[in-house]
Image: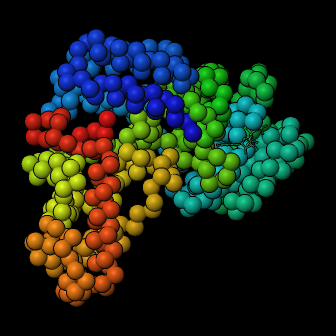
Amino acid sequence: MAFDSLTEKLQNVFKSLRSKGRLTEEDVKAALKEVRMALLEADVNFKVVKNFVKEVQERAVGQDVMNGLNPGQMVIKIVNEELVKLMGSETTEIRLQPGSAITVLMMAGLQGAGKTTTTAKLAGKYKLKGKNPLLVACDVYRPAAIKQLQINGEKQGVEVFSMGEKNRPADIAKAALEHAKKNHNNLVILDTAGRLHIDEEMMSELQEIKEAVEVHQTILVVDAMTGQDAVNVAGSFNEKIGIDGVIVTKLDGDTRGGAALSIKAVTGCPILYVGMGEKLSDLEQFYPDRMASRILGMGDVLTLIEKAGAELDEDKARQMAEKMKKAQFDFEDYLESMNQMKKMGGLSSILGMMPGLGGLGGLGKGKLPELDTQENEKKMARMEAIIYSMTVEERRNPDILNPSRKHRIAKGAGVDIAEVNRMVKQFNETRKMMKKLPGMMGGRGGKKGRFKLPF
Ligand SMILES: Nc1nc2c(ncn2[C@@H]2O[C@H](COP(=O)(O)OP(=O)(O)OP(=O)(O)O)[C@@H](O)[C@H]2O)c(=O)[nH]1
């Protein structure tokens, strides 16, 4: 998976910062040297790396440490923000024509980059959004490409327009547009022919198409596995025909991820989507902030810190964190934590921000079991009822609950006895687990005891 090695290296850098109480300029420099190495090894463009490190260094040294974050966390915060900036800050959408007007997208790219597959993937996405796409086979050099588009179009339930191999791509595009007008297609996606390398013929063919029909967005497809070549290809295409955005394919197979990190900075063109597999559903919108979180391997933990600081009763949070660390918390604390959780927007909102659990958009797919928020909120309400049916002593020490008390509690809470048993069992298991876990939260890091980063 992309960025795995970068993530690991960055986490090691941050771990070494954790042990420092205060950071000197030298500490920051040494850490950033490691960050620089890690980015270069991830195949990020060297100029991009140089600027990135310079920016982080200037900010890290010059800036006051924010209340509630220790200096190490501050560096992480800055690296995170700079990574987001590097990848374009905002999510860029493909710009569609307003209303029912036809939007024409032209897909470009080298042979094998994944153009034909991505064209069909995109069509599927926009069909789901209510568009009526028409795919156009403009690759007249490779009969297999036409067939491939037809097969994929069929899989997506999207019409494919083809005129075989005997016509010029520009004429095919023109005819396709006429067809789209008659058939009420409001999104026309032109799948053009790639070449092994950038050549004049390919570029003039794309130009001809642009002259023949009004292309609203030109989208370049590049293969992440080709690393810096992908960045150079994007630069050349942009220079020669002008591109509005890039789709980076095969990010699932690229362990380094340098292209995704460099493209925006080098070419000025935003990444629109990333291909994460061969299946037609494996196309994901590109979110710079989520990608940065993914690279740092910490979910939206900084958001969590900010949210925790703003919303929680900090003294209570500190006491709770201490108790959790020592695995001394009981059902009374459980009640308290449920109240705090409600203040912070509920369970799923918090889990979604925890590293490794969520906040990663599609990229975190598979890591977080689907959260059924409503179901969870209902479960929490039942748990609350069970705890309120216990005496204070029982809440403090659930081990004293005997079967007859559990029956009475179940009756009082209006739930099944099995639910009480399950809850007590889970509670004990959680307590055991907390004993083993390194403290996720703690009193360090701020005078009022905010949540602490897990490193
Ligand atoms: N793992 C993975 N494979 C992909 C992805 N996107 C495309 N592929 C595969 O890459 C190969 C090439 O894709 P095509 O769509 O044929 O490439 P193309 O750019 O249309 O190639 P030409 O028609 O020769 O210009 C195919 O085997 C695709 O299944 C992706 O995101 N991840």
Which residue sits furthest top? 26
- The correct choice, above or below, for 39 with respect to 334 in the image is above
Expressed as whole percent of the image width and height from the top left, the position of residue 426 reads 32, 67
Image quadrant where one finds the C terminus: top left
- The correct choice, above or below, for 65 with respect to 4 in the image is above
Q: Quarter-wise, where is residue 415 in the image? A: bottom left
Which residue is at the front of the view, 299 or 136?
A: 299
Residue at 65% over, 31% down: 225
Expressed as whole percent of the image width and height from the top left, the position of residue 266 reads 52, 21
Which residue is at the front of the view, 320 or 134?
A: 320
Q: Is residue 231 visible?
A: yes
Expressed as whole percent of the image width and height from the top left, the position of residue 74 reads 25, 28
Image quadrant where one finds the N terminus: top right
Residue at 16% over, 67% down: 397
Q: Quarter-wise, where is residue 160 in the image? A: bottom right
Left/right placement of residue 353 relative to residue 175 reads: left
Left/right placement of residue 14 relative to residue 228 reads: left
Expressed as whole percent of the image width and height from the top left, the position of residue 217 reads 59, 39
Left/right placement of residue 66 relative to residue 118 reads: left
Q: Quarter-wise, where is residue 430 in the image? A: bottom left
